[in-house]
Image (cartoon, rainbow, N blue to C red):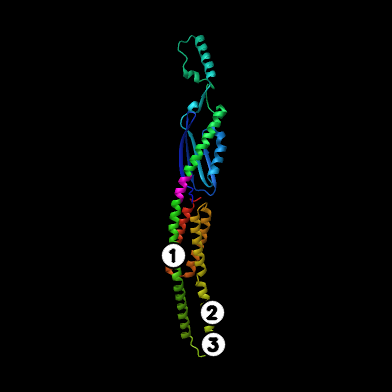
Amino acid sequence: MIISMTGFASRIFTHDDEVYKMELKSLNHRFLDLKVRMPRDLASLETPVKATLETGIKRGSIDLWIERQNGGKNEAGFRVDEERARQAHASLESLRSRLGLHEPVTLKEVIAFPEVVVRAGAEDRDPARLAGLEAKLLSELGHLIHDLTEMRKSEGARLQDALLDILNGFRQSHGKFLGLRDEIRNRAREKVKKRIEQCFEAYPTTDDRLRALMETRIAQEISAVLDRLDVEEELTRFKGHIDAIETLLKNGGAVGKKLDFLFQELNREINTLGNKSQDLGVSGEVIELKTRIEQMREQSLNLE
């Protein structure tokens, strides 16, 4: 199956009273380019997360967002040092008593003390809880990659059908070129023959040897002209490239780079056909084919 490099998937999971949302987006890229964004306290999990992505995805620009929807036990990503809070409260109560103040100590005043409330980090997590979160996260990431791959396969199937449909048009054009080939050669032969007759009419001769020499030389020129107009090899290679593209599309797999190369070769043969034919009908067909090739190349850029 052909796989597109364009896709999106999202997933929400819960672990230890914490709700996480993951979003995975994929765009076309020459290689595998990974970007991972996650909460700072999960930075130690970035390496196994990237390893999981590299195992499941072979090519594309990949963006993964991991967001904590609520704080769970570490509400909003902060930690309260209760012992320091008690010390702060006791110090404030002592100061209030010494100063003879009557207003009670408030929570706002307690948490204003340094290091009573601090941002939670990986070092604040229990190792067992962090290991459990890693296992859960990587498991959910595996499902997320599967969802993304299914979407990329669906998009790839759509592109495959579109490319095969355009390719059928190339086969019809090949048939037209086969029909025009003999017609172009005959027109060229008649054109040269007419010029020869005009030449003998303009320069009549009764010398049989001279006339024979002139006819021999003219025959050689005609042969050279017809050789330059012969597109048999180009048509053979043209069909060969069409067959190769169709086989590649039907076999599936990682076809993007191979298709790009075949499109270049096909474009080269079409240019040569147009240059050799020197026919208005062929020139119009060549322009149409070059437009279709460009369409196919643009779509194939999204294929893995």
Give the labeled residue for mark 2: 220
Q: Name the kind of residue labelled 3 in the image.
A: Leu
**Residue 176: image location, x then y, percent:** 43, 67
Q: Nearer the viewer, mark 2 or mark 1?
A: 1
Camera-nearest label, 1 or 3 = 1
Residue 160 is at least partly visible in this image: yes
Left or right: 172 in relation to 86: left
- In this rendered view, identify the residue nearer to me: 123 or 250: 250
**First in sequence: mark 3 or mark 2?**
3
- Magenta segment boundaries in residue numbering: 149-156
Image height of 157 relative to 36, above or below: below
Dot 1, how many residues are within 10 Å of its Cα: few (below 14), some (14-19), or many (20+)? some
Q: Kindly state the secondary structure of the residue where label 3 is placed.
A: helix
Q: Separation of disc 1 and disc 3 at Cα?
A: 46 Å
Q: Which mark is residue 210?
A: 3
Magenta stretch prevailing secondary structure? helix
Location of residue 49 in the rendering, given as x and y in whole percent from the top left corner: 54, 38
Instruction: State the CA–CA distance, disc 3 to disc 2.
Output: 16 Å
Q: Is residue 153 magenta?
A: yes
Q: Which mark is residue 173?
A: 1
What amino acid is found at the position of numbered circle 2 in the picture?
Gln
Separation of marks 2 and 1 at Cα, in angstroms: 32 Å
